[in-house]
Image: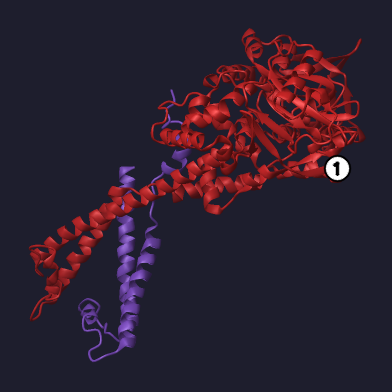
Amino acid sequence: MRQESVVIIGAGPAGLTAAHECIKQGMRPIVLEKADKVGGIARTETYKGYHFDIGGHRFLSRINNINRFWQEMLGEDFLKVSRMSRIYYEGRFFNYPLDFFNASFNLGLTESLLILLSYFRAQFWPYPEEETFEQWVSNRFGRRLYQTFFQTYTEKVWGIPCHKIRADWAAQRIKGLSLVVAVSNALLGVQQAKSLVGEFYYPRKGPGMMWERFRDAIEAGGGQVRRNWEAISLKHENGRVASVTCIQGKKTEEIPVGHLVSSMPVSRLVAMLEPKVSDKALEAARRLSYRAFIIVVLIVDKEDLFPDQWIYVHSPEVRVGRIQNFKNWSATMVPDPKKTSIGMEYFCNEGDRIWTMSDEELIDLAAGELSEVGLAKTHDVIDGVVVRQPKAYPIYDDEYEGQMTVIRNSLKTIENLQTIGRNGMHRYNNMDHSMQTGILAVENIMGAEHNLWEVNEEERYLEEDKQAKVGRVVSEKVLARAFARMDKLAFATAVGSVSGLLLFLATMWLVIKGGHAVGRNLQLLSQYFAGYTVTVKGAFIAFTYSFVWGFLFGWLLAYLRNLFLALYIYGVKRKAELLSLKDFFDHL
Amino acid sequence: MKTRDEAPRTEEEKLFSGILWLNAKALGLVLGLLFGLIIFIATNWLVIKGGRSVGLHLQLLSQYFIGYRVSFVGSFIGFAYGFAVGTLTGAFTGWIYNKIAAFRA
């Protein structure tokens, strides 16, 4: 057993995975969790026997190790679920991922045609600048489709107009649009992303079940997962965190630290360091912003309301952003099969009007909106409960990159401190990504030298397992060689020179050989090459003609080769962009 | 300020920034085999077709390819000559292309 004293703050997916990894390495970590449950935002809450998820967490990953990890942890309690989700917009339900025929039917012929025209308009006359999410989406899918499907939902999720969301963010989130990936997929017929859309895994009793198994495994291995313990101060000296002070009710404890791994919001971490870090870093931490989230769970006295796991609500008339039907994720999420529990999700900011509404007001609002979208009658709602989740999503606003640079520079002076997970790194990681940062952090404790910040910026590191990563790097190199431009002038000159030389030599050979009638057949070339004769002078004329024709032929060949490759790549990219439209909202 | 052209440039640069380099030996080998096979097949085609005067025009190749004639044995000789000329042509084309492309790059 190693005697490293590892303290991990936060028992979400990242923190628990880091602790589990510590156990595997023979260490006994202490995990401090402020809440009474493990799992962070991926926990499962319970109300009168109804289990519900804070946001709907699908378990799917391109990282094979993480998939194996999940399977091993839950075994038969890890259910494979066929996905069913739709979009609600203007009183109609659209299949989601989007389906061309269903969308056209719901929108009607006129609107579909207008969307099509708008798409072509965007292809020929795009916004010359692509600075905002609005411009980015409009340029790819047309402005009308943007207004129909993208604008209202995105603005509900992020609470800011689409023209204030940076285009970079969309490009970063929609990874299927990577040109290199799209081209290699087209060439190799890889459709991995597609297979991820149709089904996913889910723990029998909600995602919290997974993290409870992690907790059990950590405790069985000699680690501690202390719930209701809140870290309040971190003492650091000589470039190392020396101890963490935490409280539980009136109890206070100072725990010595060998290594500290933090998944709590980085803004709080910075504020907690003693002695204080620079004013600049404190200010940067203070200015980081987060989106909060409220889920209003309604118990409805109906057996079957709708078949979806969740519905995206794009209609601006209602404030709800997404509607979950938990029994469609797993039947055991509800204790009474004759009833249904519905999660009405509201994206908001801490302290705003919706955040400060009372639970009763929120339940009334949610029940009214559930009725307004036509999924249930208000009088069928028999009970409800509200869960508020602060700091649910880090916001990528105009300033966040600069602020994070300041914070990172400040934190990197503390050598035994690592930050992991979504809030720990202020990155919009999914569960698997967060877990991966936890694993890498422990590898660092064991002597590896992963730069977690760098790794997290290099998104593909987290997207794929090592084998896929190697494959991708290789294919990138191969693709770069295969699609490299042919130098038209060089090829034209080479073909011209060689063909000129061949004809020069052919003529000279016959001249040197001599004979009764020199080059009678070759002389026929003069039909095309005016002035050509099978003589020494003619050989030079032949060289000139042949060079010119060879040059033109070579140039045209190289030009067409480059043109067709460029057209091929353009087509593949456009197709990938249109395909990404199908499951665009899963990435938001 | 990013423009539509600039935004995907990093991605497209990965594919388009490079200049294609020709493998002169491979190009030579390919053209050599191609030339050789064309002569081999063309010769044997006429041999199989037969007739009163076989391959009167193709026989003109013997002006350059000493020993070549339109016969089964001649087709192998033609293949050897075609291969040699094709190899030299391809390799030389590739070599000149690479030199000029390198100079321009």
In the rendered picture of this protein, how many numbered marks are placed on residues?
Answer: 1
Q: Nearer the viewer, residue B42 or A498?
A: B42
What is the quadrant of residue A21 in the picture?
top right
**Would you say residue A122 is visible in this rendering?**
yes
> Against A269, is A202 above or below?
below
**Residue drawn where x is 65% and y is 33% of the image:** A87
Q: Nearer the viewer, residue A579 or A113?
A: A113
Chain letter for the residue marked with disc 1 in the picture: A
Quadrant in which the C terminus of chain A is drawn: top right
Q: Colour of chain B?
A: purple
Q: Colour of chain A?
A: red
The residue carrying mark 1 is A77
Quadrant in which the N terminus of chain A is drawn: top right
What is the quadrant of residue A547 in the picture?
bottom left
**Would you say residue A465 is visible in this rendering?**
no
What is the quadrant of residue A348 in the picture?
top right
SS at mark 1 in the image: helix
> Against A374, is A104 above or below?
below
**Residue drawn where x is 46% and y is 26% of the image:** A130
**Residue B55 at what x, y percent from top left?**
25, 84
**Residue A538 at what x, y percent from top left?**
10, 65
**Residue A26 at what x, y percent from top left?**
85, 36
**Residue A11 at what x, y percent from top left?**
81, 26
Q: Residue furthest bottom?
A: B52
Crowd tier of the residue under label 1, counting other residues whose Cα lies within 10 Å: few below 14, some 14–19, many 20 or above:
some
Left or right of A292: which side holds A129? Answer: left
Left or right of A504: which side holds A570? Answer: right
Q: Amino acid at mark 1?
A: Asp
> Against A435, is A358 above or below?
above
